[in-house]
């Protein structure tokens, strides 16, 4: 069996690794000849808008998926004209535009922050009057890991901020006072079967995910699942979808969705009966879904940003696992992650603190 993956980053790499025990081989399309997934997958080298490369890629695989959402929709449609592509183009298009995404959430009765579309400086000034401050100006497209986002305060120079966006279409969102950030990872099979991973608590710094801890028996699990299921069903979704949410204490407010496997679910490799990567492959290939249940009493995932700690130090900790992506070190770049597993939170607390310290020391 073969699966094509548009994109050759760490998510494609982990998809390919998850496929090996199943006898599934992956073929990636990526413009970089040294894409980090090509160590474990076949590769077509080409730009995402290169028609010949897209056709070569489609010729090699019976079904395709994608590892990031900033792909040209036209390119994915070209592949879809030749082979099956999951998740759907509708899901990809909705996730690419924050205004369309928030509108979809509202249509499905999924709570969102108050928001206003902004297409000019005059729109921005009006939006700030309507939404108030603090609030957040976000570009509608291409934002990732905190990029394309600007916090608006009472003393913010709106003209300067608007200039910094490049004058592209944006939205202003009301600031949500939350007690924690969480995500729910869901997977839907071709026959409509849905499974849900435990709600995961996430900690971000400068817009980049640093720490994820899945929660067993979380009080917001049912509400998070309901919201995710509405998206899965509306979009006739196939594969893994991540929904990021703010927990306000009273309820959940949707931030954004990702139509793909997700950084906050990396803990599933060691921590769940079936990893998000294996379940995504199962879904797109039409295979039965696996259990999403935890296999340890406590699990946590720490991102490695900039550089990866020494393997000897990480692996010297009982219950720790290291994943190196094969990417060159660079400030703000996700180059690996570490997972710690144990019988309960108290048992892994000290080891988790050690891993966080290692990650902090390597954050360049």
Image: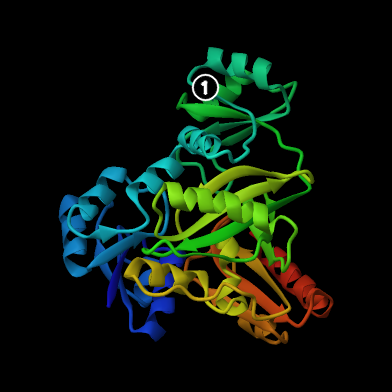
Q: Which residue is mark 1?
A: 118
| Of 177 and 167, the residue lying toward us | 177
Give the x, y percent position of residue 345. 80, 74
Q: Is residue 116 above or below residue 288?
A: above
Give the x, y percent position of residue 204. 68, 53
Q: Quadrant of the C terminus?
A: bottom right
| In this rendering, position of residue 243 left or right of residue 177 | left
Q: Quadrant of the N terminus?
A: bottom left
Residue 309, by quadrant, is bottom right
| Of 190 and 179, the residue lying toward us | 190
| In this rendering, position of residue 343 left or right of residue 288 | right
Q: Is residue 6 visible?
A: no
Give the x, y percent position of residue 350. 82, 76
The number of callouts visible is 1
Residue 318, by quadrant, is bottom right
Give the x, y percent position of residue 319. 69, 84
- At x 47% / y 53%, what residue is drawn? 232
Q: Is residue 59 visible?
A: yes
Q: Residues within 10 Å of mark 1 (few under 14, many from 20)?
A: many
User: How are the residues colored?
Assistant: rainbow
Helix, strand or loop for disc 1: strand
- At x 30% / y 70%, what residue is drawn? 3
Residue 146, by quadrant, is top right
| In this rendering, position of residue 66 left or right of residue 202 | left
- At x 59% / y 22%, what residue is drawn? 160
């Amino acid at each position: 069996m073969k699966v094509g993956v548009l994109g050759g980053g760490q998510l494609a790499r982990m998809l390919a690794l998850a496929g090996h025990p199943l006898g599934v081989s992956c073929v990636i399309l990526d413009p970089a000849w040294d894409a980090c997934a090509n160590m474990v997958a076949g590769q077509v080298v080409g730009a995402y808008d290169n028609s010949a490369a897209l056709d070569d890629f489609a010729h090699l695989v019976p079904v395709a998926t994608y590892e990031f959402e900033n792909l040209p929709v036209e390119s994915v449609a070209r592949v879809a004209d030749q082979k099956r592509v999951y998740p759907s183009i509708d899901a990809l298009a909705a996730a690419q535009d924050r205004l369309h995404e928030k509108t979809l959430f509202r249509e499905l009765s999924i709570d969102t922050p108050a928001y206003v579309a902004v297409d000019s400086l005059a729109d921005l000034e009006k939006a700030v009057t309507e939404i108030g401050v603090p609030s957040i100006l976000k570009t509608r497209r291409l934002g990732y890991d905190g990029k394309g986002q600007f916090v608006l305060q009472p003393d913010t120079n709106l003209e300067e901020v608007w200039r910094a966006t490049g004058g592209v279409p944006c939205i202003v969102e009301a600031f949500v006072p939350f007690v924690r950030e969480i995500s729910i990872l869901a997977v839907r099979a071709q026959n409509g079967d849905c499974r849900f991973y435990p709600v995961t608590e996430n900690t971000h710094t400068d817009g980049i995910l640093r720490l994820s801890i899945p929660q067993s028996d979380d009080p917001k699990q049912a509400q998070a699942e309901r919201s995710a299921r509405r998206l899965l069903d509306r979009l006739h979704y196939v594969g893994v979808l991540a929904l990021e949410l703010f927990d306000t204490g009273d309820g959940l407010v949707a931030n954004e969705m990702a139509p793909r496997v997700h950084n906050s679910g990396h803990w599933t490799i060691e921590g769940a009966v079936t990893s998000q990567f294996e379940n995504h492959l199962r879904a797109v290939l039409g295979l039965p879904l696996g259990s999403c249940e935890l296999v340890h009493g406590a699990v946590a995932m720490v991102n490695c940003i900039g550089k990866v700690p020494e393997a000897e130090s990480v692996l010297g900790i009982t219950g720790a696992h290291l994943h190196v992506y094969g990417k060159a070190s660079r400030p703000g770049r996700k180059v690996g992650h570490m997972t710690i597993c144990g019988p309960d939170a108290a048992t892994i607390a000290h080891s988790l603190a050690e891993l966080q310290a290692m990650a902090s020391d390597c954050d360049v």
